[in-house]
Image (spheres, grey):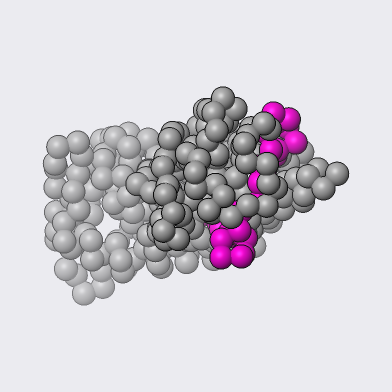
Amino acid sequence: MNKNSYQQLDLNLLKTFLVLFDEQNMRKASERLFVSQPAISQALSKLRNHFGDELFVKVHGGLKATAFSEELIQLIQPHMSGLENALNRNNELDLSTLDQTINIALSPVVMTCLSGALYRAVSKQAPNSRLVLTSWSSSTLEDIQKGRILAGVNYDVSHPKEVYSQHMIELEGRVIVRQDHPLKKSLATLKDISEYEIASLFIPGWNDDFSLAAEAMKREGLPAKIGFRSEVVMALIDVVLHTNMFMPHSNLFPQHLYPSLRTINVLINGETFKEPVLSYSHVKNRNSPMMTWLQGLIKNALEAQVSLNTRKNNF
């Protein structure tokens, strides 16, 4: 490698390198950069010649980074992200002229309770933008890393260092049952609910192989049986309406919209169970005006929904 490698390198090639490393696929990289595949091939050839390494080898379905490439990405990515933030630092966000698609991935818990509020807020504040809400999936964190999803909202999940998490709100645990459910208490214990089956919400990438309610019961030596699982909240509601199952949820659930259901507060060791909700975004966007606005919007919507539910339930 030449002694002054930096001065002899077209820095635009590093943008191509970063995207190729993310996508591990020539076609996807070309789509993301809005250039042709031959242009990507040409850029990769220049990068290989400059660094004296193959950087990526062809494998079934795409590319695989070499060991040199793996090391190089760790060295340059923080600096490229810092450069992007520095250049965008003084860009004020003009919501009235913001014209872009805002992709957000929501866990099923949030999707059911917050979609309308988020849509109304974005439509009012950034009327030229388009809000796209998708369900949180096992690929969401990768989608955030690769720029396909701008932000995600879920419970606390393990995530790579390229993804930045920020606390939004702490929800209180509740269980949802039908109005004429045999358990008539409004405040119950784990023992009270342990004789009923669980209609468990499945969130890909978070509780793929467990249920928080079931785990809590087992720790207390109580029986726990999951009668039904789904990542679709409406499917769980339908099951709860026609059985004695209960659905673990939170004080985010708008029970007042479902008059055939009621909410039971559950104490665990004498205390209300609490679970934090966080937002997730690429670490390079953590201080951007766009992300600051979006995280504030999400946080306000969550707090407003919980406050509304509290007022409705106390009425």
Front residue (pair 255, 108): 255
Quadrant where the C terminus sits is top right
Quadrant where the N terminus sits is bottom left
Reply yes or no: does residue 276 show up in magenta: yes
Report x, y in % for residue 20.
29, 47
Q: Is 208 on the left-hand or right-hand side of 126?
A: left
Q: Is 235 on the left-hand or right-hand side of 314?
A: left
Front residue (pair 76, 246): 246
> Relative to residue 227, is residue 90 depicted above or below?
below
Report x, y in % for residue 242.
56, 25
Residue 85 appears anywhere in the view = yes
Report x, y in % for residue 234.
56, 29
Front residue (pair 32, 59): 59
Reply yes or no: does residue 294 show up in magenta: no
Front residue (pair 253, 206): 253
Report x, y in % for residue 70.
23, 61
Q: Magenta residues?
A: 252-280
